[in-house]
């Protein structure tokens, strides 16, 4: 395949990045990921490392510009920032994350100069995923939005998720796309290359039918409450009584459920402020009906520390404090620089304290569960390292910050991967949407309509057993990829003419 003209490549790269966004929810065109990544790979072929970095940056601008634009809504509509400041910060975020595809292009070309087709495609795919891991789990506490593996939650490649997780799925996707370019170019004979690609995809289809976990007991009834309290009035002290009454009324209609779950910070007050007059009477009513409650609210700590917490109300009162905080949303990294910039732009942001890394699992319905608040469900290892002792996963979130955008649907797609990786039911209560139930196979079982004060009820089954991914996490996948890059590079150097 001939090298693309320079300016044609410059146009194709951002267009391919924008097309990749359509592979994710809510657009749900996962097959578009293949041509989007293939086009990026094509622009990188026979380029210098610096040129590949520029093209990768253009791809990143297309991807994150079309896929993360909703950050503007939270900064402007609910953060009260001026349009210019909100636009500048949104652009800064998009430009910063676009550096990662640029880095992938630079490193991939550096590693692959002169390598043969299969080696080149494999190394490019491995480098891409390793760079995704740096973005998704390392820098600034991690921001794993739009990892390519998430786009495959409904394709045969999802069958590999219980073994290799989202990063492994991403590697197989990238390798498929990159190898296809080599097959079309004739550098990989189609009689050898096509069967390998088809084997990867058919193997995933077979694995979709494998049950990695098994029931641990009888099913029980869970009700999820979606309050639909607008972010602009959520913390208004004059609205507090109405908000608490809303959640209580929606709950009282479901005292026949074993567990009722409210979303993140559904209670717009610190625990100590509502403990006596609201929490205790609510807990008494729940116990009288044989129902356990799980709800989100802020709670105080020592000194000026306060936490984004989940409270489980049963025979005992249990608390979980969010550990993996959202940078620039719940805490300010790069202090004092970040605080000074945000103060200069008059943008108020929270400064929560992080809960302990290891906390006792909460329980409800007779079983312990993994608790995730907001985007904690975007981190596979955070869930995987706790899942052996848990029968299901609970996520409480509030995506009202992002309005009627793609963000809540992207978030649900990421949460679904956690169910698939661990073989557990996932129940997800949100403020405005998307509230719903996900099965152990990652498929959506039921959802509530968005932007409606409502409830959704379903039976779930407690599960036990540990998938290969849950046992080993992301580390072994990344270690294999890094070792493979080294082995392929050394092997190519040894046989290089």
Image (cartoon, helix red, strand yellow):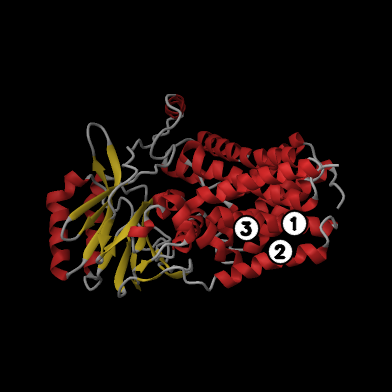
**Distance in Å between CA atoms under marks 3 and 2:** 23 Å
Mark 2, secondary structure of its residue: helix
Residue name at image x 67 percent, y 39 percent: 102
User: In the rendering, at what x and y percent does residue 15 appear?
Assistant: 71, 50
Query: Which residue is label 2 attached to?
Result: 197
Quadrant (top left, top right, bottom left, bottom right) of the C terminus: top right
User: In the rendering, at what x and y percent does residue 333 appear?
Assistant: 44, 32
Q: Is residue 40 above or below residue 209?
A: above
**Distance in Å between CA atoms under marks 3 and 1:** 22 Å
Q: Earlier in the sequence, mark 3 or mark 2?
A: 3
Mark 2 and mark 1 in contact? Answer it, CB < 8 Å: yes
Query: Which residue is label 1 attached to?
Result: 179
Residue name at image x 70 percent, y 67 percent: 198
Query: Which residue is label 3 attached to?
Result: 22
Decide: few, some or many residues near mark 1? Use Cα within 10 Å; few <14, some 14-19, many ≥20: many
Q: Earlier in the sequence, mark 3 or mark 1?
A: 3
User: In the rendering, at what x and y percent does residue 304 appear?
Assistant: 25, 32
Mark 3 and mark 1 in contact? Answer it, CB < 8 Å: no
Residue name at image x 18 percent, y 54 percent: 317
């Amino acid at each position: 395949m001939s090298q693309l003209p320079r300016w044609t490549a410059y146009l194709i790269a951002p267009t391919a990045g924008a097309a990749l966004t359509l592979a994710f929810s809510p657009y749900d065109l996962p097959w578009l990921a293949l041509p989007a990544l293939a086009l990026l790979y094509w622009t990188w072929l026979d380029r210098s490392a610096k040129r590949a970095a520029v093209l990768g940056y253009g791809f990143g601008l297309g991807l994150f510009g079309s896929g993360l634009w909703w950050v503007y809504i939270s900064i402007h509509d609910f953060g009260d920032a001026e349009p210019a400041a909100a636009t500048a910060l949104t652009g800064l975020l998009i430009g910063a994350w676009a550096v990662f595809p640029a880095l992938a292009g630079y490193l991939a070309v550096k590693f692959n100069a002169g390598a043969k087709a299969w080696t080149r495609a494999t190394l490019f795919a491995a480098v891409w995923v390793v760079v995704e891991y740096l973005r998704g789990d390392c820098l600034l506490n991690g921001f794993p939005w739009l990892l390519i593996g998430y786009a495959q939650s409904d394709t045969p490649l999802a069958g590999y998720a219980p073994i290799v997780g989202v990063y492994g799925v991403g590697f197989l996707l990238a390798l498929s796309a990159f190898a296809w370019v080599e097959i079309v170019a004739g550098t990989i004979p189609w009689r050898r290359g096509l069967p390998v690609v088809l084997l990867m995809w058919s193997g995933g289809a077979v694995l979709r039918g494998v049950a990695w976990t098994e029931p641990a007991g009888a099913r029980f009834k869970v009700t999820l409450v979606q309050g639909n309290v607008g972010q602009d009035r959520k913390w208004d002290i004059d609205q507090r009584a109405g908000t608490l009454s809303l959640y209580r009324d929606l709950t009282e209609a479901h005292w026949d459920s074993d567990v009722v779950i409210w979303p993140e910070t559904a209670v717009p007050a610190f625990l100590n402020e509502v403990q006596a007059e609201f929490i205790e009477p609510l807990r008494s009513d729940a116990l009288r009906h044989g129902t356990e409650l799980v709800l989100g609210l802020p709670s105080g700590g020592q000194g000026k520390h306060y936490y984004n917490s989940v409270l489980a109300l049963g025979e005992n009162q249990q608390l979980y404090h969010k550990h993996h905080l959202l940078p620039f949303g719940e805490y300010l990294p790069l202090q004092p620089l970040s605080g000074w910039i945000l103060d200069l732009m008059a943008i108020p942001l929270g400064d929560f304290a992080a809960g302990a890394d290891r906390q006792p699992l909460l329980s409800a319905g007779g079983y312990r569960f993994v608790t995730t608040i907001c985007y904690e469900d975007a981190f596979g290892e955070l869930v995987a390292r706790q899942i052996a002792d848990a029968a299901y996963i609970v996520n409480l979130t509030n995506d009202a910050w992002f309005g009627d955008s793609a963000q809540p649907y992207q978030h649900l797609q990421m949460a679904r991967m956690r169910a698939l990786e661990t073989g557990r039911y996932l129940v997800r209560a949100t403020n405005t949407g998307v509230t719903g139930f996900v099965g152990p196979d990652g498929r959506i079982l039921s959802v509530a309509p968005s932007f409606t004060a409502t409830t959704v009820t379903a039976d779930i089954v407690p599960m036990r057993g540990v998938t290969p991914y849950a046992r080993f996490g992301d580390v072994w996948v990344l270690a294999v990829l890094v070792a493979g890059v080294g082995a392929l590079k050394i092997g190519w150097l040894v046989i290089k003419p």
